[in-house]
Amino acid sequence: MNKTQKAINVSDELEKLFGLPNRDKSGTVLDCLVETILSQNTNDVNRDRAFKTLTKEFPSWEEVLEADVNQIASVVRIAGLAGQKSHAIKNFLTWLHTKYGKLDLEFLRDMDSEEATQMLCQHKGIGIKTAYVTLAFACGHEVFPVDTHILRISKRIGFISSKATADQAHQFWSTTCPEGKAFSFHMNLITFGRQVCDARKPKCEVCPLTDQCVYFQNGGQLP
């Protein structure tokens, strides 16, 4: 079986297990980008707390733009890497306002995915995962973000090498993700990683994918 067909099979199995996830359409594209920057190397709870505190302290992005970067850092400290993230947010807002005259990213909804990715990734602190999450969640683009769960599962099932990097995984999934399934497959793989294919203690006894999993077939080891 080729990997494209295998991806279709895995996607179908996960849909049977978890259904089709709903896409949250609240918030702006810029909101999503800033939230995603805050989410780097932390959990969802700390990301949400940092974003809530930031938007309470500075009710508009214009106020964030005018704030000192140290003020921003102190507000988002709960998310970790506060200095790095505050500089990324401040620098991006400065660039956006200088280039377009306003703090609005809604035009990304209609931009070509590759062009939009390149535009976002030119900024320090915004990598391909952050760009893809923003485009997938806020804009409905057919792009496939790879997080730690998806990277782990991709290796265990045998889609990519056990030594593959996150960038290599993004490249793989950009051509292999089943058509029209980028968002649902992404979300279901994350749910699967949290509930079944745990990093330390995967629940192989209840997993519906063991017949396609090289990790399971190799006795709980990556080849």
Image: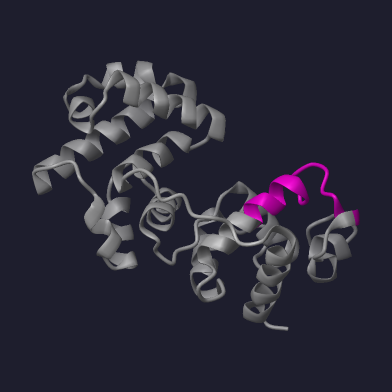
Depth check: give the residue in front, 92 or 59.
59
Name the residue rendered at 54%, 55% in the picture.
Answer: 22
Residue range of the region highlighted in magenta in the rendering? 189-205
Spot occupied by residue 123 in the image (x, y as percentages of width and height): 28, 46
Residue situated furthest bottom in the rendering: 1
Q: Quadrant of residue 33?
A: top left
Quadrant containing the C terminus in the rendered view: bottom right
Name the residue rendered at 11%, 48% in the picture.
Answer: 100
Question: Horizontal placement of 72 versus 159: left or right?
Answer: left
Spot occupied by residue 173 in the image (x, y as percentages of width and height): 54, 67
- Colour mapping used in the image: one colour
- Asked if the stretch drawn in magenta spans residue 204, the answer is yes
Query: From the viewer's perspective, is residue 115 above or below residue 120?
Result: below
- Asked if the stretch drawn in magenta spans residue 74, the answer is no
- Asked whether the viewer can see residue 61, the reply is yes
Quadrant containing the N terminus in the rendered view: bottom right
Depth check: give the residue in front, 13 or 79.
13
